[in-house]
Amino acid sequence: MEDVDASSLMHNAKNQKLSKEHDVGEGENRIGNLTDTIAQHILSFLSTKDAAKTSILSKRWTYLWLSIPVLDFHDGANHYSDSDEPPYKRKHFMDIVERVLLLRDYSTITNFSLTCNVLYDSSRINTWISAVVKHKVQVLNIRLYKIREPFILPCCLFTCESLQELKLNIYYPLKLPSFVSFSSLKILTLIRIVFPDDHSAQMLFKGCSILEELHLISCSWENVKAVCISSPRIHKLHIEDKEPPPNYVTDDEDVDIDGENNLVGQNDDSDDESDNIDDQNNPVYQNDDIGDQHSSDDQSDDTVGQSDSGGCQFAVFGTSLKYFSYFGGFFLDCYIQDSSSILEADLMACYSDRKIDYRAFKLLRGLSNAKSLKVDQFAVTALNDKLVAHLPVFNSLTHVHFDWVVLFYSRQVLLSMLQKFPCLSSLKFEGLSFMFRYFGTYDWTLGPVPGCFLTHLKTIEISMFCGSEIELHAVRILLKSATVLEKIVISFNPWELKDADGLKKQQEAQEQILSFPRASLGCLIAISCPPKEKKCLEFFL
């Protein structure tokens, strides 16, 4: 009986082993039965380096990865690296890219990304780009560094019919062919591009007839006098203009108003007309737009603000523009016409200079149809009461976000701005007077009370709250002035709650806030006390 049981156990074990081997075999067959298209689609989610490793799986997989639709080559180059890579690594990288493109079949390359140093290999890199264009590339990302010989992108790139998204990150003068036509391009991102003249910049943008998104980041405009963006379909425009041009004169430097560097003289009527892109459709704003309320000193300051100062006039005709964002020092003299379609606008300045206050005003004026607006401290302080007084009424604006605005420095400008937002229903302050000390008095009020506080303002949000006296006074005034307010949300800065003293300060501030009188009796106060690990939200009636 024992022999029968032992024999039965051995038989069962053998069957289980065969069953497992059969299952494994079936799994291998299932993978092997995948079509090339499906296998390549799976490989496209891997980096090109990892996809290449699958060539050792079997004979079938040896060349399968060479036809994947997504290719990404990166030799480790970046904008901040000064040292060159070892020659053997350079040769290995160059050989791999050429091998992949040489052995590739006629299948389409949907996405191609190349990041590398150019050094003295301009012709080889241009050959790669030309090969990718022949494979009907749809998304192309080119980042090139350390260009040590003349470099011109291949002509075929600028007439590529399949290209839908293009990103160029090349700190080098952009030389264009005689004809530019991106018939399918919808998204264009230019980073650190150097435009050699007006003609090249204008020809590039005119060649993008169906462009929907445009991102211009840290490009060089010092050789460009005027640019016009007028693509009828563009709905998103992002500009970063953080680096001053070489000939820019800062506020701290001496400005020769009447001498050789006569900035005022550069902006007389005749020069303004010559700077105009199209006198009929692109009017250049004059100082007369501000009115006659300026003193002679103010007039001089505003005129200096309009001066060229190494920047160029940047006109945007946004008939379909929905999202606009600007981050920089207003070195570009940027203005927007036909902005009735704008939904969201961000205006962030990297610092403030009295010479650029008029440019900030002009750009903000062009956003008067926006429904949502975000501005930071430097953008606010770039303005002054006289300029803000001449802003149009923002009748469509329902949400405003003031980012890192120091209330006791900017409150008069803020008040003047709020008077221009009659339909505002949502107001947010982030980093209100963050990490600043105030030695003044707290007897100032919100007067006259903006009209939106009496009719439309339903929600106020204050984040990164520190519980300082100036912040508490601001909350007191807001609660006392907003007669139709439904909710105020206050979120404490978690770094202020890192010890017992911080928690005690938060508790005291919370008690004070709850004791403040409210013009709107039904207003809900929500205080958020977010520790780093967990966020806690408390509601009070």
Image: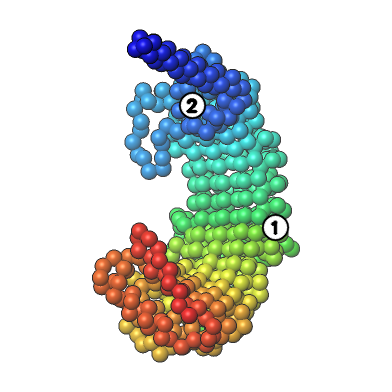
Q: Residue at x 64, y 22 (%)?
A: 106
> Which residue reaches farthest right?
280
- Judged left or right of residue 281, residue 439 is left
Q: Nearer the viewer, mark 2 or mark 1?
A: 2
The residue where tag 2 is placed is 51
Check disc 2 and give the amino acid type: Ala
Q: Residue at x 37, y 83 (%)?
A: 512
Which residue is the extreme one toward the left?
Answer: 500
Q: Pick out the residue farthest to the front.
A: 1
Q: Is residue 175 above or below residue 109?
A: below
Point 50% across, 63% down: residue: 348
> In which image quadrant can residue 109 be found?
top right
The amino acid pointed to by label 1 is Ser
**In terms of image quadrants, where is residue 3?**
top left
- Residue 320's disc is 1
In this rendered view, identify the residue nearer to me: 60 or 144: 60
Location of residue 179 in the rendering, given as x and y in whole percent from the top left corner: 69, 38
> Residue 217 or 417: which is nearer the viewer?
417
Badge 2 or badge 1: first in the primary sequence: 2
Give the x, y percent position of residue 129.
57, 30
Circle 1: element type: loop
